């Protein structure tokens, strides 16, 4: 879980963090409102292309397939075979029938999720967290909330190191981490306890340090060392995203109320 | 999202809970949640135990700080591990609030109260997590063993929502029971000198713990280990 990410200098990583957040929301919205899985599929393919541009294809593929394959299998099984909406049988396995409606519903959910997951992954893998927090803070996020996100990212690897030291120390005292379920469970408290206690003392010191540096002062604007720039590209991207979302929503609403004929025979199933 | 907007307006009124002392506790507690999870896989325990930090902070600083801890834990998991965890932030927030308010009512002092917290926590977690699994993910996320249990139950019960809920209840009952027990043991062991500095933050629990923990009396937690 301890991560050290180097951010390649690509067109994607140069985008303003807010643009990427906007992209997550707008692409997700497009996939959600669209009546079937086709637009989601198109967006997922587009995201794969973006991941190549952002030079994170291996990470991206790992997350997308690591989530996509199990969830597709699970949902095809659960929804495809047992969805109450099933009417059209497309395959018979003897113990259950595979229904078209359930399969389409599962495909739609998987695609919607993959759009969110993919865009979020691209955002988190191409954005320096400091820049993300600075952007969020300048967009109106409470500076203390920003501190919390950054502090967690710093504190957790630090606590993991402390954990491994304590594990070694407890092992040296003869604490057994193997054996039956209950003896392993009994090893839990002597391992976690010291981490909690030392972290609490650490938190106390951290609190005093922050207080003396004016962290608790309210009604002032905290400044950041990290500067994020809003460029023309970001402006264009935002407009494109918003216009796309509006058009997609309009078409989808049209399909739902029947003004526009469904583009695919199974839409709205 | 509507949930979040409501929370922000609440924010102003709850501000008293968020002193610098409590704020620095939040990343630590989120860290404890995550370490608890990694320790589980290190010890090869078939559990999650990922809300021990939330329970501890609920005892130290109150319900809203605990809720924020839960939110932050899931944000961290989403940023670092897998974005699938993000919607479950709602579950962590609700659990933090439930535990926090029950601790505030003094239930953490008595053993039956702790059992009550365990059951409430299980129920809140199972209901909200099932709703998210059914409505966001359509029945299974495929990232945990719970999904397999759900799939088995779907075959038996032929009802998706009921299967998701029953598998959530079963796994949560065990998981949250152990998590609450461990948190109880750890909170009992936190030095009084440390607890007392949070006493003014409005949670009011520490006083209770201090009151019935007579000096010289052996720690109740020791019997359990």
Image (cartoon, coloured by chain):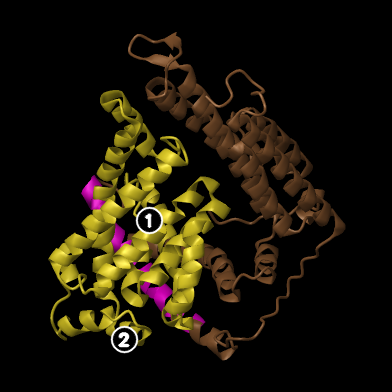
Chain colours: A brown, B yellow
Q: Name the main secondary structure of what is drawn in magenta.
A: helix
B68 with respect to B218 (left or right): right
Question: Can you identify the residue that label 1 sits on?
Answer: B50
At which x and y percent is residue B59?
A: 31, 73
Within the magenta stretch, is there residue A187? yes
- Magenta part of the protein: which range? A180-206
At which x and y percent is residue B131?
A: 38, 44
Residue at far bottom of view: A212
Question: Can you identify the residue that label 2 sits on?
Answer: B196
**Measuring 55% from the left and 84% from the top, which residue is drawn there?**
A210
At which x and y percent is residue A169?
A: 37, 65
Q: Nearer the viewer, residue A157 or B180?
A: B180
- Vertical placement of residue A103 versus A4, above or below: above
Q: Which mark is residue B164?
A: none
The quarter holding residue A50 reads top right
Circle 2 crowding by C-alpha within 10 Å: few under 14, some 14–19, many from 20: some
Q: Chain of mark 2?
A: B
At which x and y percent is residue A77?
A: 42, 24
Q: Is residue A71 visible?
A: yes
């Amino acid at each position: 879980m301890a991560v050290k990410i180097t951010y390649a200098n690509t067109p994607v990583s140069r985008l303003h963090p807010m643009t990427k957040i906007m992209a997550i929301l707008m692409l997700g919205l497009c996939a959600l409102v669209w009546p079937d899985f086709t637009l989601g599929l198109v967006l997922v393919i587009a995201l794969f292309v973006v991941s190549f541009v952002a030079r994170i294809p291996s990470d991206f593929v790992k997350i997308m397939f690591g989530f996509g394959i199990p969830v597709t299998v699970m949902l095809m099984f659960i929804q495809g075979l047992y969805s109450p909406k099933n009417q059209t049988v497309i395959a018979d396995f003897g113990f259950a029938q595979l229904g078209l409606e359930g399969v389409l519903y599962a495909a739609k959910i998987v695609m919607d999720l993959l759009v969110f997951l993919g865009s979020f992954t691209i955002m988190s893998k191409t954005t320096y967290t400091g820049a993300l927090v600075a952007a969020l803070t300048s967009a109106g996020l409470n500076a203390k909330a920003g501190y919390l996100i950054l502090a967690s990212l710093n504190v957790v690897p630090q606590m993991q190191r402390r954990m491994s030291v304590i594990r070694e120390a407890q092992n040296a005292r003869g604490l057994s981490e193997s054996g039956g379920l209950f003896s392993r469970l009994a090893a839990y408290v002597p391992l976690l306890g010291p981490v909690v206690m030392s972290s609490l003392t650490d938190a106390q010191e951290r609190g005093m340090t922050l207080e003396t540096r004016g962290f608790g002062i309210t009604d002032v604007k905290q400044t950041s060392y990290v500067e994020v720039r809003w460029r023309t590209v970001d402006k264009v991207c935002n407009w494109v995203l918003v216009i796309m979302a509006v058009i997609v929503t309009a078409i989808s609403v049209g399909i739902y109320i029947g003004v526009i004929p469904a583009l695919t025979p199974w839409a709205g199933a | 999202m509507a949930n979040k907007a409501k929370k922000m307006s609440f924010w102003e009124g709850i501000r008293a809970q968020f002193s610098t002392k409590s704020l620095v506790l939040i990343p630590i507690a989120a860290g404890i949640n995550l370490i608890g999870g990694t320790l589980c896989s290190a010890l090869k325990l078939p559990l999650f135990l990922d809300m021990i930090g939330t329970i501890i902070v609920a005892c130290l600083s109150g319900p809203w700080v605990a809720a924020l801890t839960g939110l932050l834990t899931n944000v961290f998991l989403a940023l670092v591990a897998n974005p699938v965890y993000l919607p479950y932030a709602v579950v962590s927030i609700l659990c933090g609030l439930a535990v926090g308010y029950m601790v505030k009512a003094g239930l953490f002092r008595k053993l039956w109260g702790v059992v009550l917290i365990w059951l409430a926590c299980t129920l809140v977690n199972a209901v909200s997590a099932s709703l998210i699994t059914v409505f966001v993910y359509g029945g299974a996320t495929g990232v945990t063993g719970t999904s397999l249990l759900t799939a088995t139950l779907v075959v038996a019960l032929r009802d998706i929502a009921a299967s998701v809920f029953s598998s959530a209840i079963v796994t949560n009952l065990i998981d949250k029971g152990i998590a609450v027990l461990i948190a109880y043991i750890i909170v009992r062991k936190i030095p009084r000198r440390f607890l007392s500095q949070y006493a003014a933050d409005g949670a009011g629990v520490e006083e209770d713990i201090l009151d019935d923990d007579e000096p010289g009396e052996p720690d109740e937690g020791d019997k359990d280990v």
